Image (cartoon, helix red, strand yellow):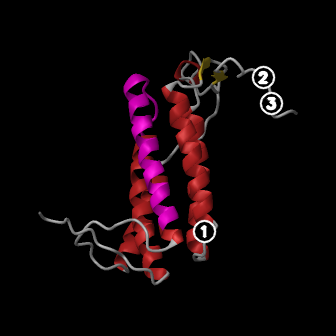
Amino acid sequence: MKIYTKTGDKGTTSLFGGTRVPKHHIRIESYGTVDELNSHIGLLRDQDTDKETKEFLMEIQDRLFTIGSILATDPEKEKLKNGKDRLNIPRISAEDIEKLEKAMDQMNEELPAMTHFVLPGGHQSVSFCHIARCVCRRAERLSSALYDIEKYDDSVLIYLNRLSDYLFVLARKLTKQLNAEEVQWIPKKS
């Protein structure tokens, strides 16, 4: 099978289910940004961190593929006339969201209380984490805009929201693990 199909040469692409849309469609922007986020998570997973974090990041990458397939599906073609799933797309579960929350709670138990905003940086791994967090927020904004136009499973929005929080807490954990400096943002007053 060839990677190139030439079907997108005129600026359109196919959604899961066959519907063709422009490559600049909000749906494409949404799942394209989730794909970008997944690549940043992969880069983060390649950093020097503990085995448990690496395994959890791999699980997150799996969920991001699930989110991508949800976002890449034409809602008109997702269900049969009898209401059953036509395309058998996986879902984001409440358990997936709870895992992010539990991981954050566990990391927060070992971190000092936050009293100020923190500046991204301090170590390359921490910076990669903050970049992933920002891309996650962009994916959430785009997915939210899509949701306003065409409803889909809102667990996607919840998961992306929790994931950006998780990435922030993970950045703080990595700062501590790597003995990096966590620089507080103290607004300068005139």
Magenta region, residue range: 127-155
Please, what is the three-letter code of the amino acid marked with disc 3?
A: Tyr
Please, what is the three-letter code of the amino acid marked with disc 2?
A: Lys
Question: Is residue 48 shown above or below 55?
Answer: below
Please, what is the three-letter code of the amino acid marked with disc 1?
A: Lys
- For the point 50% across and 81% down, the residue is 178
Q: Earlier in the sequence, mark 1 or mark 3?
A: 3
- For the point 37% across and 27% down, the residue is 148
Query: Dot 3 lies on which element?
Result: loop
Mark 3: give few (<14), some (14-19) or many (20+) Cα within 10 Å.
few
Query: Disc 3 to disc 2, how far (Cα)?
Result: 6 Å
The residue indicated by pointer 2 is 6
Question: Is residue 89 shown above or below 76?
Answer: below
Which circle marks residue 4 in the picture?
Answer: 3
Picture quarter with the N terminus: top right
Magenta stretch: residue 153 in it? yes
- For the point 43% across and 43% down, the residue is 138
Q: Position of residue 109 (x, y in %)?
A: 35, 77
Query: Dot 1 lies on which element?
Result: helix
Mark 2: give few (<14), some (14-19) or many (20+) Cα within 10 Å.
few
Question: Is label 3 in contact with label 2 (beta carbons under 8 Å)?
Answer: yes
Camera-side mark, 1 or 2 = 2
Mark 1: give few (<14), some (14-19) or many (20+) Cα within 10 Å.
some
Q: Can the viewer see residue 101 in this picture?
A: no
Q: Quadrant of residue 67?
A: top right
Query: Dot 2 lies on which element?
Result: loop
Q: Position of residue 78 (x, y in %)?
A: 58, 24
